[in-house]
Image (cartoon, rainbow, N blue to C red):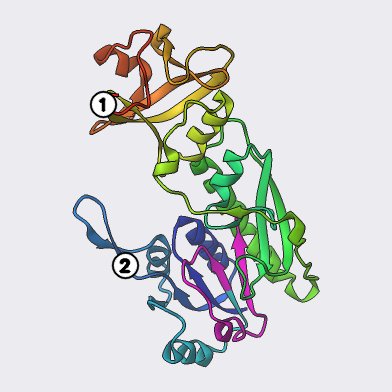
Amino acid sequence: MRLVFAGTPAFAAAALDALADAGHDIVLVLTQPDRPAGRGMKLAHSAVKQTALARGLPVAQPASLKTAEAQAELAALEPDVMVVAAYGLILPQAVLDLPRHGCLNIHASLLPRWRGAAPIQRAILAGDTQTGITIMQMDAGLDTGAMLTQTVVPIRQDDTAGSLHDTLAAVGAGAIVAALAQLDTLAPQAQDERLATYAAKLGKSEAQLDWTLPADVLARAVRAYDPVPGAWTLLDGVPLKVWAAAAVAGDGAPGTVVAAPGGEIRVACGRGILVLRAVQPAGGTRMSTAAFLAGRPLVPGTRLGEAAGA
């Protein structure tokens, strides 16, 4: 099938690889413009651009698809379908209408649950036991189009946003290849608006652990914010990231270290205890709490989450 592919991060790159391996005629790859990255803030290619260049595929990086010039260039390619995965740019109606089979999106949730920018993290935060991949026909709304296929993926108790992302990327790659193979026989199914939920974009401030919440909620937050932006708290007014934690029974004043036995830091929450097992001090690297405590012992009664002088 003659197609245009639009995507930017690693999640999308997996699908691009799969489509190329399946023998589709990829006439153009669209990805966002190069962005500064790393300590040197040098311009870096997106994961999709790297994949496209490695495969010798043509790449375009328009700042917008709303211009007549960009739309004319796409129309001249006469694509059968446009596949979109985490592209990051809005597709105007003129672009949605261009391909013979329209534009298909690979979305990392079981729509209509978790429409929006952060479906993987929001599913973990909410305590969902499953998520998945939806292949949908794009329309002008935000992830509101008719669904073509859905693939269910269980959320494991130890899944982080990073591990679940990798699983869903692989599932999404297979799902879009399968959907294109049977595109003429698939029956689009409208989403039930009554079941819709919104997965708002993540912010660093919301990743600060609120010790008045139950321990199981905070344990999910630690997993949901791994690897970005990273759950964090304050110790002596300085940020301390938390990379691994588990909820256990117990009580105490929220935010108070109740014990630090055997290399674990146990912190009282609104309900239960959060056991910290891996942390990262400001300016340092990720380490076990045992390694952290070797250089910075904590005594019971130490308060986390408070600004200096509080």
Residue at (67%, 59%) from the top-left corner? 134
Q: Is residue 178 above or below residue 208?
A: below
Residue 80 pos. (x, y %): 62, 83
Q: Amino acid at mark 1?
A: Ala
Q: Quadrant of the N terminus?
A: bottom right
Q: Is residue 173 above or below residue 279?
A: below
Kindly report the distance in space between the C-alpha atoms of the residues bearing marks 2 and 1.
39 Å
Is 99 one of the magenta-colored residues? yes
Question: Which dot marks residue 34?
Answer: 2
Q: Nearer the viewer, residue 151 or 219?
A: 219
Residue 110 falls left or right of residue 291: right
Residue 184 falls left or right of residue 48: right
Specify the segment rendered in magenta: 83-108
Are the residues tagged 2 and 1 within 8 Å (C-beta)? no
Image quadrant in which you'd find residue 51: bottom left
Residue at (52%, 57%) from the top-left corner? 117
Q: Nearer the viewer, residue 126 or 289?
A: 126
| Residue holding disc 1 | 308
Residue 5 pos. (x, y %): 52, 73
Residue 107 falls left or right of residue 296: right
Local packing at callout 1 (Cα closer than 10 Å; few below 14, some 14-19, many 20+) is few
